[in-house]
Image (spheres, grey):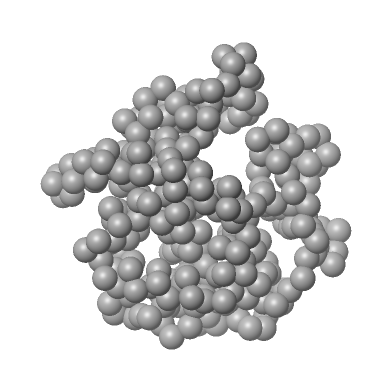
Amino acid sequence: MLTLYDYGNSVCCQKVRITLRAKGLEWKAIRVNLFTSEQYDPNYLKLNPKGVVPTLVYMDTPVIDSTLICEFLDDTFPDPPLMPKDPGERARMRLWSKYVDEGLFEGVTEISFSAMFREKMKDMSSELRERRFANIGDPRRRDRFRSTYDLGVHSPFVLWAIYAYERAFKHMEATLSERGPWLLGEAPTLADINMMPFVARLSYLGLLEAWTADRPRVSEWWARSQEWPTFKSGLSDLVTEAEFADMRAYGPTIRGDIDELLAGLRGKH
């Protein structure tokens, strides 16, 4: 009944897979290789005109955008519930979706690109590299990637990414102090699931403590998340050893620059 078009180490796909696991659902997985541009295949674009992953197909109906997919799954398969019934609490939950969709999604992309994919693109021929840039249909997204390729961690888009995480973690620390142990209280919800892949990526890159060293509630939340069986089966168990090795190798190379840029941001505020 459920088909998920996904890519293993995509943070947005990880968010959906955690939700599927939390619901105890089974699905058919179809891999879309982002590095060979399968997301731009005409047949895939019929399902997802944005040319991104994931796409969920249920009863022959495609659902796109990971935030919408997660809410769709909770509406369609309501047990166990991952969204509160109270409208005010639901609005609080969606605030964390907005942190992700309006900041952390682009933020984690820029940080990951500056640490890992930039170095891999340097090894490509100029012809192949230009073809990869040309395949990015969205001019704004293409400009971001070009900037990060040219300037690395010193791209203004990476600074913006660092600020997006700083803002989210600051609010997260305050929220957990008031409401913990999870973002909405006693049980994990889509608020937590939305954040988990974006925190995990920083952790796997060896960069997380730049933001969390002085935020004990966030650190406790992350430790708790890693022990949640649903997180393990939906995310960490599905990251390959080669992917872990890449992140462990490349991430620390930009840690000093991240620390310096983050210190500058905190000094201004």
Task: Report the residue at 41% width, 22% height from top.
Answer: 150
Q: In the image as oriented, which residue stretches furthest toward the bottom?
A: 186
Above or below, 65 relative to 268 = below
Q: In the image as oriented, which residue stretches furthest toward the top?
A: 127
Res 181 quadrant in image: bottom left
Task: State left or right for residue 190 relative to residue 167.
Answer: right
Tell me where residue 83 appears, x and y as whole percent.
55, 76
Q: Count the marks: how many?
A: 0
Q: Can residue 68 be seen in this view?
A: no
Task: Report the residue at 55% width, 70% height from top.
Answer: 231
Above or below, 91 relative to 181 = above
Q: Is residue 27 visible?
A: yes
In the image, 127 versus 266, the foreground residue is 127
Above or below, 84 relative to 119 = below
Res 215 quadrant in image: bottom left
In the image, 15 versus 116, the foreground residue is 116
Task: State left or right for residue 29 relative to residue 253.
Answer: right
Tell me where residue 238 appears, x and y as whole percent.
63, 60
Tell me where residue 177 appears, x and y as whole percent.
28, 77
Res 41 quadrant in image: top right
Task: Report the residue at 29% width, 61% height from top.
Answer: 212
In the image, 212 versus 180, the foreground residue is 212
* Quarter placement of the N terminus: bottom right
